[in-house]
Amino acid sequence: MIKPLIPENEKERLAKLYEYSLLDSLEEEEYDQITRLASKICDTPISLISLIDKDRQWFKSKVGLDQKETERDTAFCAHAINEPDHTFIVEDSRKDERFHDNPLVADDPNVVFYAGVPLVCDDQALGTLCVIDNEPRELSDDQLESLSDLANQLVKLFELRRNKLLLERTVRELEQRNKNLDEFARIAAHDIKSPLGNIYGLVELLEQKTADSDPETQEIIGMIQDSAKGLSSLIDGILKHAKTNSLLLEERSFFSLADLIKDTLKLLDPKGKQGLSLEMEGESVYANKVAIQQILINLIANAIKYNTNPEPKLEIGLKQERTKVIVSISDNGPGIKPEDQERIFKIFHTTSNKDVNGSTGTGIGLATVKSLVEGMGGEISLKSEIGQGSTFYVHLPVMDI
């Protein structure tokens, strides 16, 4: 018996093999189907999906054989991987000096005929799809071609398996990162808001003690209060943005989008100060209600808060198709400059517009809206003219009933 040579690229070959996490894995029907087909097509009692490990030959799937693995030194497949571009064929092992006294030939399973197609992934031969008989024989060209086709399908199965493993690992890593970000945001918010609360208290105390002071002192105290409020808004915005991914994971449900819009309006404009126009059509939809409500809250709140027109007007439209809804939210505010219309959707980017209280935004709200909309497979766009107001259009995929 002649032992199989160790490939020159053995280190890289084994590294590639281990990427697929195939060794010692459970039986899987899609692999067993291939070995059954190989056995039937080639009319052989034994068919194997063999993987060559460091010191052993392990069978991912087998027909006509009880053993789960053998020593590598006796494996025919260990010879086959040294010729990755060819089907390795031994018509009668008893007459072949490499195998005539091999234990697998002399004893069970009595390998006489062998044909193995190397399973090559990224230029590395991991093992073979092989067929075995207990007597000498030849395979026809059609049988050899079919065996090669099955081997190609096996390689595709391997690749699908690896991609699935990589995807699962990426998902786990992202989930852990999201948890870490949520925890960081929570701790950071707590650590910042605690001293911020102290600042509020001290400023109020200072304001009381300096009530009769000069206007300049009062102005400075007012600036400190405004800065504290701005920092508090920024922290709240960061926390909301950090929760974007968790909102997208909320389960979908059936609900009336029109009712949700009306409820959001009552929440944001309870006294009905806006000149309101509603044009809505559609019944219940099946969608992520929590995420959509957060989108509506941000857009409607902005339309109200940044509208400095003496006679503010708010128009909301809802059009519903079979698998899509279009929500439009318009105001008659100052409008947004053309050069700002793209960048306002990027986090921490703001315009020069001030709200009804004279404050500028944090640049977080619209970035959060865009993340939510696109995370749901939708699109958001803007039309605006200076002095004429703005309209945001949200296209969302839904399922109607």
Image (spheres, grey):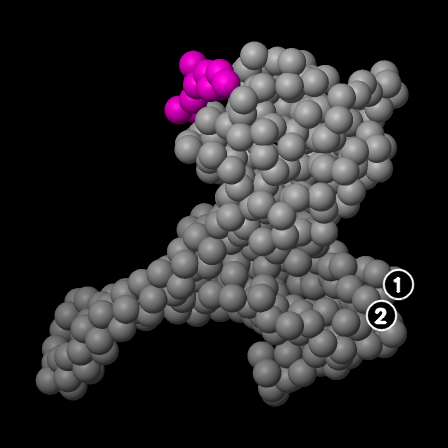
- Which residue is more in the foreground, 70 or 312? 70
Residue count near mark 1 (Cα–Cα under 10 Å), binned few <14, some 14–19, many ≥20: few
Residue 303 vertical position relative to residue 401 in the rendered view, above or below:
above
Quick check: marks 1 and 2 in contact, CB under 8 Å?
yes
Residue drawn at (66%, 44%) of the image: 65
Q: Amino acid at mark 2?
A: Asp
**Left or right of residue 289, residue 348 in this image:** left
**Left or right of residue 214, residue 128 in this image:** right
Describe the element under mark 2 as helix, strand or loop: strand
Residue drawn at (40%, 63%) of the image: 179
**Cα–Cα gap, marks 1 and 2:** 6 Å
Which numbered marker is on residue 322?
1
Q: Quadrant of residue 82?
A: top right
Q: Position of residue 282 (x, y in %)?
A: 86, 72
Q: Amino acid at mark 1?
A: Arg
Q: Position of residue 279 (x, y in %)?
A: 83, 71
- Give the labeled residue for mark 2: 400
Magenta span includes 5: yes
Magenta highlight range: 1-12
Residue drawn at (55%, 50%) of the image: 25
